[in-house]
Amino acid sequence: MKVALLYPEVYDMARYRQERKEFPPFGVLYLAAVAEEAGHQVAIHRVAPGHTALNLASFDAVGFSLASSATYGLMLQARRDATINPDALVMVGGVHANFYPAESLKDFTADVVADGESEDTILELLDRADDRDFSTVAGVLFERDGQIVRNVPRPLMRDIDTLPLPARHLLPVDDIVLRDRLAGTNTRMAHVMFSRGCPFPCSFCAVAQRRMQYRGGVSARTELTHLIDTYGIEGFAIVDDNFIVNKDKVTDICHHITDLGLRWSALSRVDTVDQPLLNTMAASGCIEIKYGMESGSERLLKAMRKNTTQAKIRAAVEMTAKAGIQAKVFIIHGFPGENTETTRETIGLLRELRPTLGRVSLFRFVPLPGTEVYANALLHGIHGTHQQPGWDGDWTKFHIHHNERHWWGDADAWAETERSYAELRAFVEGEWGPQG
Protein backbone atom coordinates (compact mmCIF):
# COMPACT_ATOMS: atom_id res chain seq x y z
CA MET A 1 0.00 0.00 0.00
CA LYS A 2 1.21 3.51 -0.81
CA VAL A 3 1.06 5.79 2.21
CA ALA A 4 1.62 9.56 2.39
CA LEU A 5 2.33 11.17 5.75
CA LEU A 6 2.07 14.97 6.00
CA TYR A 7 3.68 17.19 8.63
CA PRO A 8 3.78 20.99 9.12
CA GLU A 9 7.10 22.72 8.72
CA VAL A 10 7.93 24.91 11.70
CA TYR A 11 10.97 26.92 12.68
CA ASP A 12 13.19 26.51 15.70
CA MET A 13 11.64 28.34 18.65
CA ALA A 14 14.93 29.94 19.70
CA ARG A 15 15.68 31.42 16.26
CA TYR A 16 12.21 31.82 14.76
CA ARG A 17 12.86 35.12 13.00
CA GLN A 18 15.89 33.62 11.27
CA GLU A 19 13.66 30.86 9.85
CA ARG A 20 16.01 28.24 11.28
CA LYS A 21 14.80 24.68 10.86
CA GLU A 22 13.28 22.89 13.81
CA PHE A 23 14.23 19.30 14.59
CA PRO A 24 12.82 16.60 12.26
CA PRO A 25 9.19 15.45 12.66
CA PHE A 26 9.82 12.39 14.81
CA GLY A 27 6.15 11.48 15.00
CA VAL A 28 5.83 10.81 11.28
CA LEU A 29 9.37 9.43 11.06
CA TYR A 30 8.49 6.65 13.49
CA LEU A 31 5.14 5.98 11.81
CA ALA A 32 6.88 5.79 8.46
CA ALA A 33 9.47 3.39 9.87
CA VAL A 34 6.94 0.90 11.21
CA ALA A 35 4.84 1.13 8.03
CA GLU A 36 7.89 0.46 5.86
CA GLU A 37 8.89 -2.43 8.07
CA ALA A 38 5.43 -3.89 7.50
CA GLY A 39 5.94 -3.72 3.73
CA HIS A 40 4.16 -0.48 2.85
CA GLN A 41 5.58 2.15 0.50
CA VAL A 42 5.80 5.44 2.39
CA ALA A 43 6.45 9.06 1.43
CA ILE A 44 6.71 12.03 3.79
CA HIS A 45 5.43 15.42 2.60
CA ARG A 46 6.16 18.81 4.11
CA VAL A 47 3.31 21.30 4.45
CA ALA A 48 4.22 25.00 4.60
CA PRO A 49 2.54 28.31 3.75
CA GLY A 50 2.23 28.41 -0.03
CA HIS A 51 2.96 24.69 -0.19
CA THR A 52 -0.39 23.08 0.55
CA ALA A 53 -1.67 22.02 -2.89
CA LEU A 54 0.03 18.63 -2.82
CA ASN A 55 -0.68 15.97 -5.42
CA LEU A 56 -1.45 12.86 -3.38
CA ALA A 57 -3.73 11.17 -5.91
CA SER A 58 -1.53 8.09 -6.21
CA PHE A 59 -1.65 7.19 -2.51
CA ASP A 60 -3.96 4.61 -0.94
CA ALA A 61 -3.77 6.24 2.49
CA VAL A 62 -3.00 9.77 3.62
CA GLY A 63 -2.12 10.74 7.20
CA PHE A 64 -2.14 14.29 8.59
CA SER A 65 0.12 14.87 11.59
CA LEU A 66 -1.23 17.76 13.68
CA ALA A 67 2.04 18.54 15.40
CA SER A 68 0.77 21.69 17.12
CA SER A 69 -2.38 23.74 17.47
CA ALA A 70 -0.62 26.75 15.93
CA THR A 71 -0.24 24.85 12.64
CA TYR A 72 -3.75 23.38 12.73
CA GLY A 73 -5.07 25.90 10.20
CA LEU A 74 -2.15 25.22 7.88
CA MET A 75 -2.86 21.49 7.90
CA LEU A 76 -6.57 22.16 7.30
CA GLN A 77 -5.57 24.22 4.28
CA ALA A 78 -3.57 21.28 3.00
CA ARG A 79 -6.59 19.03 3.50
CA ARG A 80 -8.64 21.41 1.34
CA ASP A 81 -5.97 22.07 -1.30
CA ALA A 82 -4.36 18.65 -1.74
CA THR A 83 -5.47 16.28 -4.46
CA ILE A 84 -6.43 13.04 -2.69
CA ASN A 85 -7.93 9.91 -4.22
CA PRO A 86 -11.60 9.77 -3.10
CA ASP A 87 -11.07 6.13 -2.13
CA ALA A 88 -7.97 6.81 -0.04
CA LEU A 89 -8.01 6.23 3.70
CA VAL A 90 -7.69 9.63 5.43
CA MET A 91 -6.11 9.47 8.89
CA VAL A 92 -5.39 12.22 11.43
CA GLY A 93 -3.15 12.12 14.48
CA GLY A 94 -0.62 14.14 16.44
CA VAL A 95 -0.59 16.52 19.40
CA HIS A 96 -3.68 18.57 18.56
CA ALA A 97 -5.66 15.46 17.66
CA ASN A 98 -4.73 13.91 21.01
CA PHE A 99 -6.28 16.84 22.86
CA TYR A 100 -9.27 17.41 20.57
CA PRO A 101 -9.87 14.21 18.59
CA ALA A 102 -13.58 14.66 17.88
CA GLU A 103 -13.10 18.17 16.51
CA SER A 104 -10.17 16.99 14.39
CA LEU A 105 -12.21 14.13 12.95
CA LYS A 106 -14.95 16.53 11.91
CA ASP A 107 -12.75 19.35 10.64
CA PHE A 108 -10.64 17.09 8.44
CA THR A 109 -13.59 14.96 7.26
CA ALA A 110 -11.29 12.09 8.13
CA ASP A 111 -12.09 8.41 8.15
CA VAL A 112 -10.40 7.96 11.49
CA VAL A 113 -8.43 9.85 14.17
CA ALA A 114 -5.68 8.22 16.21
CA ASP A 115 -5.52 9.36 19.83
CA GLY A 116 -2.23 8.65 21.59
CA GLU A 117 0.74 6.47 20.69
CA SER A 118 0.14 5.40 17.10
CA GLU A 119 2.85 3.06 15.79
CA ASP A 120 0.70 -0.03 16.36
CA THR A 121 -2.46 1.89 15.53
CA ILE A 122 -1.39 2.89 12.03
CA LEU A 123 -0.58 -0.70 11.09
CA GLU A 124 -4.05 -1.85 12.15
CA LEU A 125 -5.67 1.04 10.30
CA LEU A 126 -3.80 0.24 7.09
CA ASP A 127 -4.88 -3.39 7.40
CA ARG A 128 -8.48 -2.15 7.49
CA ALA A 129 -8.18 0.41 4.70
CA ASP A 130 -10.40 -1.63 2.38
CA ASP A 131 -13.36 -2.43 4.65
CA ARG A 132 -13.00 0.62 6.97
CA ASP A 133 -14.03 -1.50 9.93
CA PHE A 134 -12.21 0.18 12.84
CA SER A 135 -14.40 -1.32 15.56
CA THR A 136 -11.57 -3.40 17.08
CA VAL A 137 -8.77 -0.83 16.74
CA ALA A 138 -7.82 0.60 20.15
CA GLY A 139 -7.09 4.29 20.49
CA VAL A 140 -9.15 5.67 17.59
CA LEU A 141 -12.27 7.72 16.88
CA PHE A 142 -14.43 7.36 13.78
CA GLU A 143 -17.95 8.05 12.64
CA ARG A 144 -20.58 5.35 12.27
CA ASP A 145 -24.24 5.96 11.40
CA GLY A 146 -23.81 9.67 12.02
CA GLN A 147 -22.37 9.18 15.51
CA ILE A 148 -18.79 9.47 16.69
CA VAL A 149 -17.46 6.21 18.10
CA ARG A 150 -14.55 6.36 20.52
CA ASN A 151 -12.82 3.05 21.06
CA VAL A 152 -10.98 2.03 24.22
CA PRO A 153 -7.60 3.76 24.71
CA ARG A 154 -4.52 2.02 23.40
CA PRO A 155 -2.11 0.94 26.16
CA LEU A 156 1.37 2.42 25.92
CA MET A 157 4.12 0.17 24.64
CA ARG A 158 6.07 -1.51 27.38
CA ASP A 159 9.29 -1.43 25.38
CA ILE A 160 9.92 1.32 22.83
CA ASP A 161 13.27 -0.29 22.02
CA THR A 162 11.30 -2.62 19.76
CA LEU A 163 10.56 0.25 17.38
CA PRO A 164 12.67 0.56 14.22
CA LEU A 165 14.89 3.61 13.88
CA PRO A 166 13.02 6.70 12.61
CA ALA A 167 12.87 6.80 8.80
CA ARG A 168 15.29 9.68 8.32
CA HIS A 169 16.10 8.46 4.80
CA LEU A 170 12.72 9.79 3.65
CA LEU A 171 13.80 13.39 4.31
CA PRO A 172 16.55 15.48 2.69
CA VAL A 173 19.92 15.21 4.44
CA ASP A 174 19.78 18.95 5.21
CA ASP A 175 16.73 18.27 7.40
CA ILE A 176 18.67 15.68 9.40
CA VAL A 177 22.23 17.00 9.70
CA LEU A 178 22.57 20.56 10.99
CA ARG A 179 25.22 22.92 12.31
CA ASP A 180 25.04 25.82 14.78
CA ARG A 181 22.49 23.82 16.74
CA LEU A 182 24.51 22.27 19.56
CA ALA A 183 25.26 24.57 22.49
CA GLY A 184 26.32 27.42 20.23
CA THR A 185 29.00 25.32 18.51
CA ASN A 186 29.41 24.49 14.82
CA THR A 187 29.25 20.76 15.48
CA ARG A 188 27.86 18.54 12.71
CA MET A 189 24.90 17.11 14.59
CA ALA A 190 21.53 15.36 14.46
CA HIS A 191 18.53 15.21 16.80
CA VAL A 192 17.44 12.06 18.62
CA MET A 193 14.62 10.98 20.91
CA PHE A 194 15.55 8.63 23.75
CA SER A 195 12.39 8.85 25.88
CA ARG A 196 8.72 9.76 25.72
CA GLY A 197 6.44 11.53 28.15
CA CYS A 198 6.85 13.79 31.16
CA PRO A 199 5.32 13.04 34.58
CA PHE A 200 5.30 16.62 35.86
CA PRO A 201 2.11 18.75 35.95
CA CYS A 202 3.38 22.18 34.83
CA SER A 203 0.28 24.21 34.06
CA PHE A 204 1.72 25.94 30.95
CA CYS A 205 3.00 22.79 29.21
CA ALA A 206 1.00 20.69 26.74
CA VAL A 207 2.09 17.11 27.43
CA ALA A 208 -0.39 14.42 26.43
CA GLN A 209 1.55 11.53 27.98
CA ARG A 210 2.43 11.50 31.66
CA ARG A 211 4.05 8.07 31.86
CA MET A 212 7.73 7.96 30.98
CA GLN A 213 9.06 5.49 28.43
CA TYR A 214 12.82 5.16 28.11
CA ARG A 215 14.95 3.50 25.51
CA GLY A 216 17.87 1.47 26.78
CA GLY A 217 21.56 2.13 26.35
CA VAL A 218 21.99 -0.53 23.66
CA SER A 219 19.20 0.99 21.57
CA ALA A 220 20.61 4.52 21.97
CA ARG A 221 24.06 3.35 20.94
CA THR A 222 22.66 1.55 17.88
CA GLU A 223 20.98 4.72 16.64
CA LEU A 224 24.00 6.92 17.28
CA THR A 225 26.30 4.46 15.52
CA HIS A 226 23.92 4.50 12.56
CA LEU A 227 24.01 8.31 12.50
CA ILE A 228 27.81 8.30 12.60
CA ASP A 229 28.10 5.74 9.81
CA THR A 230 25.35 7.21 7.60
CA TYR A 231 25.63 10.95 8.19
CA GLY A 232 29.04 11.47 9.76
CA ILE A 233 27.68 13.26 12.83
CA GLU A 234 29.97 14.62 15.53
CA GLY A 235 27.26 15.30 18.08
CA PHE A 236 23.55 15.14 18.85
CA ALA A 237 20.77 16.88 20.75
CA ILE A 238 18.16 14.94 22.70
CA VAL A 239 14.76 16.52 22.03
CA ASP A 240 12.78 14.66 24.71
CA ASP A 241 10.37 16.76 26.77
CA ASN A 242 12.34 15.90 29.90
CA PHE A 243 15.19 13.45 29.39
CA ILE A 244 16.54 13.48 32.94
CA VAL A 245 13.85 11.90 35.10
CA ASN A 246 14.96 8.31 35.74
CA LYS A 247 18.61 8.56 36.76
CA ASP A 248 19.28 4.85 36.26
CA LYS A 249 17.98 5.00 32.68
CA VAL A 250 20.04 8.09 31.89
CA THR A 251 23.15 6.49 33.42
CA ASP A 252 22.64 3.35 31.33
CA ILE A 253 22.52 5.40 28.12
CA CYS A 254 25.59 7.40 29.15
CA HIS A 255 27.64 4.29 29.86
CA HIS A 256 26.77 2.80 26.46
CA ILE A 257 27.73 5.88 24.42
CA THR A 258 30.80 7.25 26.22
CA ASP A 259 33.34 5.71 23.84
CA LEU A 260 31.61 7.11 20.73
CA GLY A 261 33.28 10.47 21.29
CA LEU A 262 30.15 12.52 20.54
CA ARG A 263 29.19 15.84 22.08
CA TRP A 264 25.56 16.21 23.11
CA SER A 265 22.86 18.19 24.91
CA ALA A 266 19.52 17.49 26.60
CA LEU A 267 16.62 19.15 28.42
CA SER A 268 15.93 18.75 32.13
CA ARG A 269 14.22 20.16 35.17
CA VAL A 270 16.40 21.69 37.85
CA ASP A 271 15.17 19.27 40.52
CA THR A 272 16.02 15.99 38.76
CA VAL A 273 19.82 16.26 38.61
CA ASP A 274 22.57 15.58 41.12
CA GLN A 275 26.35 15.86 41.02
CA PRO A 276 27.17 12.17 40.35
CA LEU A 277 24.71 12.03 37.45
CA LEU A 278 26.02 15.27 35.96
CA ASN A 279 29.57 13.95 36.21
CA THR A 280 28.53 10.78 34.39
CA MET A 281 26.82 12.80 31.67
CA ALA A 282 29.89 14.99 31.24
CA ALA A 283 32.12 11.94 30.90
CA SER A 284 29.89 10.63 28.11
CA GLY A 285 30.17 13.86 26.10
CA CYS A 286 27.35 16.09 27.40
CA ILE A 287 28.28 19.75 26.86
CA GLU A 288 25.00 21.52 27.63
CA ILE A 289 21.85 20.98 29.68
CA LYS A 290 18.83 23.19 28.99
CA TYR A 291 16.78 23.77 32.13
CA GLY A 292 13.19 24.94 32.34
CA MET A 293 13.77 27.63 34.93
CA GLU A 294 10.73 29.64 33.72
CA SER A 295 10.84 32.34 36.42
CA GLY A 296 12.82 33.61 39.37
CA SER A 297 9.63 34.34 41.31
CA GLU A 298 8.67 31.58 43.71
CA ARG A 299 5.09 32.87 43.70
CA LEU A 300 4.89 32.36 39.95
CA LEU A 301 6.74 29.03 40.08
CA LYS A 302 4.07 27.82 42.50
CA ALA A 303 1.28 29.15 40.28
CA MET A 304 2.87 27.37 37.31
CA ARG A 305 2.91 24.12 39.33
CA LYS A 306 6.66 23.84 38.75
CA ASN A 307 7.28 22.75 42.36
CA THR A 308 10.77 24.23 42.23
CA THR A 309 12.48 27.03 44.10
CA GLN A 310 15.24 29.58 43.67
CA ALA A 311 17.48 27.36 45.76
CA LYS A 312 16.96 24.39 43.44
CA ILE A 313 17.65 26.55 40.40
CA ARG A 314 20.89 27.83 41.93
CA ALA A 315 21.98 24.33 42.90
CA ALA A 316 21.33 22.85 39.45
CA VAL A 317 23.25 25.58 37.62
CA GLU A 318 26.16 25.41 40.07
CA MET A 319 26.39 21.59 39.90
CA THR A 320 26.21 21.68 36.12
CA ALA A 321 29.08 24.14 35.91
CA LYS A 322 31.08 22.08 38.41
CA ALA A 323 30.68 19.04 36.14
CA GLY A 324 32.08 21.03 33.23
CA ILE A 325 28.74 21.23 31.41
CA GLN A 326 27.25 24.50 30.16
CA ALA A 327 23.87 25.39 31.63
CA LYS A 328 21.18 27.11 29.59
CA VAL A 329 17.80 28.20 30.97
CA PHE A 330 14.43 28.87 29.41
CA ILE A 331 12.40 31.76 30.82
CA ILE A 332 8.66 32.22 30.29
CA HIS A 333 7.52 35.78 30.95
CA GLY A 334 3.92 36.87 31.32
CA PHE A 335 2.24 33.98 33.12
CA PRO A 336 -0.99 35.22 34.76
CA GLY A 337 0.05 37.33 37.74
CA GLU A 338 3.37 38.46 36.26
CA ASN A 339 4.22 42.03 37.20
CA THR A 340 7.18 44.32 37.80
CA GLU A 341 8.01 42.68 41.13
CA THR A 342 8.06 39.10 39.78
CA THR A 343 10.03 40.19 36.72
CA ARG A 344 12.70 41.85 38.84
CA GLU A 345 12.93 38.69 40.95
CA THR A 346 13.76 36.84 37.72
CA ILE A 347 16.31 39.47 36.74
CA GLY A 348 17.86 39.27 40.18
CA LEU A 349 18.27 35.52 40.05
CA LEU A 350 19.67 35.63 36.51
CA ARG A 351 22.15 38.31 37.58
CA GLU A 352 23.25 36.11 40.47
CA LEU A 353 23.67 33.09 38.16
CA ARG A 354 25.43 35.03 35.40
CA PRO A 355 29.01 33.81 36.15
CA THR A 356 28.00 30.14 35.67
CA LEU A 357 25.09 30.43 33.24
CA GLY A 358 26.03 29.97 29.59
CA ARG A 359 22.87 30.83 27.68
CA VAL A 360 19.31 32.11 28.18
CA SER A 361 16.26 31.81 25.92
CA LEU A 362 13.36 34.13 26.71
CA PHE A 363 9.79 33.41 25.67
CA ARG A 364 6.47 35.09 26.27
CA PHE A 365 3.66 33.15 27.90
CA VAL A 366 1.04 31.65 25.59
CA PRO A 367 -1.92 29.57 26.87
CA LEU A 368 -1.20 26.56 24.70
CA PRO A 369 -4.19 24.33 23.86
CA GLY A 370 -4.06 21.17 25.92
CA THR A 371 -2.50 22.82 28.97
CA GLU A 372 -4.03 23.19 32.42
CA VAL A 373 -4.09 26.96 31.96
CA TYR A 374 -6.02 26.62 28.71
CA ALA A 375 -8.46 24.06 30.10
CA ASN A 376 -9.17 26.30 33.13
CA ALA A 377 -9.15 29.61 31.30
CA LEU A 378 -11.69 31.32 33.55
CA LEU A 379 -9.78 30.34 36.68
CA HIS A 380 -6.63 31.96 35.31
CA GLY A 381 -8.39 34.93 33.69
CA ILE A 382 -7.39 33.76 30.20
CA HIS A 383 -9.41 34.82 27.18
CA GLY A 384 -9.31 33.89 23.50
CA THR A 385 -9.60 30.09 23.73
CA HIS A 386 -11.73 28.01 21.37
CA GLN A 387 -13.94 26.97 24.29
CA GLN A 388 -15.03 30.53 25.08
CA PRO A 389 -17.61 32.84 23.50
CA GLY A 390 -16.31 34.92 20.62
CA TRP A 391 -13.86 32.30 19.33
CA ASP A 392 -12.57 33.56 15.98
CA GLY A 393 -11.32 30.22 14.66
CA ASP A 394 -7.70 31.41 14.49
CA TRP A 395 -5.46 28.66 15.85
CA THR A 396 -2.33 30.42 14.61
CA LYS A 397 -2.56 32.83 17.54
CA PHE A 398 -1.15 30.07 19.78
CA HIS A 399 2.36 30.25 18.36
CA ILE A 400 5.16 30.69 20.88
CA HIS A 401 7.45 32.93 18.85
CA HIS A 402 7.52 36.50 20.24
CA ASN A 403 3.79 36.37 20.85
CA GLU A 404 2.64 39.81 22.03
CA ARG A 405 -1.07 39.01 22.28
CA HIS A 406 -2.97 40.30 25.33
CA TRP A 407 -4.00 37.01 26.99
CA TRP A 408 -5.14 37.99 30.48
CA GLY A 409 -5.77 40.86 32.86
CA ASP A 410 -7.16 44.33 32.31
CA ALA A 411 -5.45 47.02 30.27
CA ASP A 412 -3.42 48.34 33.21
CA ALA A 413 -2.19 44.90 34.28
CA TRP A 414 -1.21 44.07 30.72
CA ALA A 415 0.58 47.39 30.25
CA GLU A 416 2.67 46.57 33.33
CA THR A 417 3.41 43.13 31.89
CA GLU A 418 4.57 44.72 28.65
CA ARG A 419 6.84 47.18 30.45
CA SER A 420 8.34 44.50 32.66
CA TYR A 421 8.95 42.23 29.67
CA ALA A 422 10.87 45.01 27.96
CA GLU A 423 12.98 45.41 31.10
CA LEU A 424 13.70 41.68 31.29
CA ARG A 425 14.51 41.40 27.61
CA ALA A 426 16.89 44.35 27.77
CA PHE A 427 18.71 42.69 30.67
CA VAL A 428 18.93 39.27 28.97
CA GLU A 429 20.13 40.71 25.68
CA GLY A 430 22.64 42.92 27.45
CA GLU A 431 24.16 39.90 29.22
CA TRP A 432 23.67 37.04 26.75
CA GLY A 433 23.11 38.70 23.39
CA PRO A 434 20.09 39.13 21.07
CA GLN A 435 17.12 36.82 21.39
CA GLY A 436 15.89 35.10 18.22
Image (cartoon, helix red, strand yellow):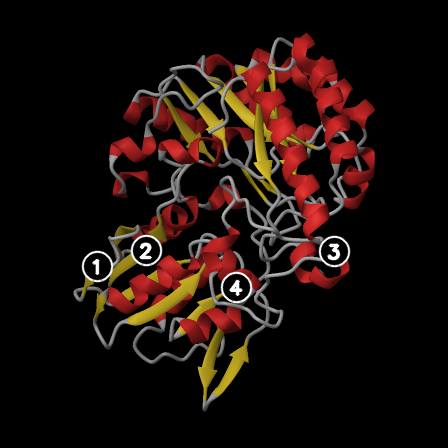
Mark 1 residue element: loop
In the image: residue 311, left or right of residue 100: right
**Rendered location of residue 269, percent (x, y):** 68, 31
Quadrant showing the N terminus: bottom left
**Rendered location of residue 309, percent (x, y):** 81, 30
Rounded to the nearest angstrom, the CA distance separating label 1 from label 3 is 41 Å
Rounded to the nearest angstrom, the CA distance separating label 2 from label 1 is 10 Å
Q: With respect to residue 80, does 359 lie above or below?
A: above
Q: Nearer the viewer, mark 1 or mark 4?
A: 1
Snapshot quadrant of residue 56: bottom left
Give, as a three-letter code, the residue at label 3.
His
Rounded to the nearest angstrom, the CA distance separating label 2 from label 3 is 35 Å
Which numbered dot is residue 6?
2
Snapshot quadrant of residue 372: bottom right
Q: Nearer the viewer, mark 2 or mark 1?
A: 1
Rounded to the nearest angstrom, the CA distance separating label 2 from label 4 is 17 Å
Give, as a three-letter code, the residue at label 1.
Leu
Residue labelled with disc 3: 380
Residue labelled with disc 1: 54
Name the foreground residue: 420 vs 33. 420
Mark 2 residue element: strand
Q: Nearer the viewer, mark 1 or mark 3?
A: 3
Give neighbour class at mark 1: few <14, some 14-19, many 20+ (Cα, 10 Å).
Answer: some
Give neighbour class at mark 4: few <14, some 14-19, many 20+ (Cα, 10 Å).
Answer: many
Give neighbour class at mark 3: few <14, some 14-19, many 20+ (Cα, 10 Å).
Answer: some
Which of disc 3 and disc 4 is earlier in sequence? 4
Rounded to the nearest angstrom, the CA distance separating label 4 from label 3 is 27 Å
Which of disc 4 and disc 1 is earlier in sequence? 1
Residue drawn 50% across the image and 41% down it: 161
Report the residue that reaches farthest toward the bottom: 145
Kindly indicate whether the residue at mark 1 contacts the one at mark 2 (C-beta within 8 angstroms): yes
